Image (cartoon, rainbow, N blue to C red):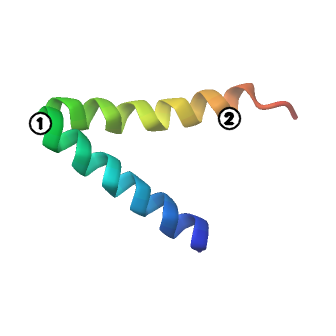
């Protein structure tokens, strides 16, 4: 639960920063890029 909380807090901070500096376009790009990075990490993880 602690990791979930910190992940949400960091995501909210990054989203607010992105919206303040680039509007919806930058916020949307950041919102798309973070899950894609997570998916790429998951796909290349050694089993």
Residue ID for mark 2: 42
As measured in the structure, the alpha-carbon distance from the residue carrying label 2 to the one carrying label 1 is 29 Å
Label 1 secondary element: helix
Which residue is labeled 1 in the image? 23
Image position of 12 with respect to 5: above or below: above
The N terminus sits in image quarter: bottom right
Quadrant assignment, res 44: top right
**Image spot of residue 15 (x, y percent):** 28, 47
- Give the percent coordinates (x, y) of residue 45: 77, 31
Q: Nearer the viewer, mark 2 or mark 1?
A: 1
Residue 42 x %, y %: 68, 35
Location of residue 34 (image quadrant): top left
Looking at the image, residue 47 lies above or below residue 16? above
Among numbered discs 2 and 1, the one appearing first in the sequence: 1
Numbered disc 2: secondary structure: helix
Residue at 41% of width from left, 30% of height from top?
Answer: 33
């Amino acid at each position: 639960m602690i990791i979930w909380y910190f992940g949400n807090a960091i995501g909210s901070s990054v989203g607010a920063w992105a919206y303040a500096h680039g509007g919806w376009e930058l916020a949307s790009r950041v919102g798309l890029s973070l899950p894609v990075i997570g998916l790429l990490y998951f796909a290349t993880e050694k089993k």
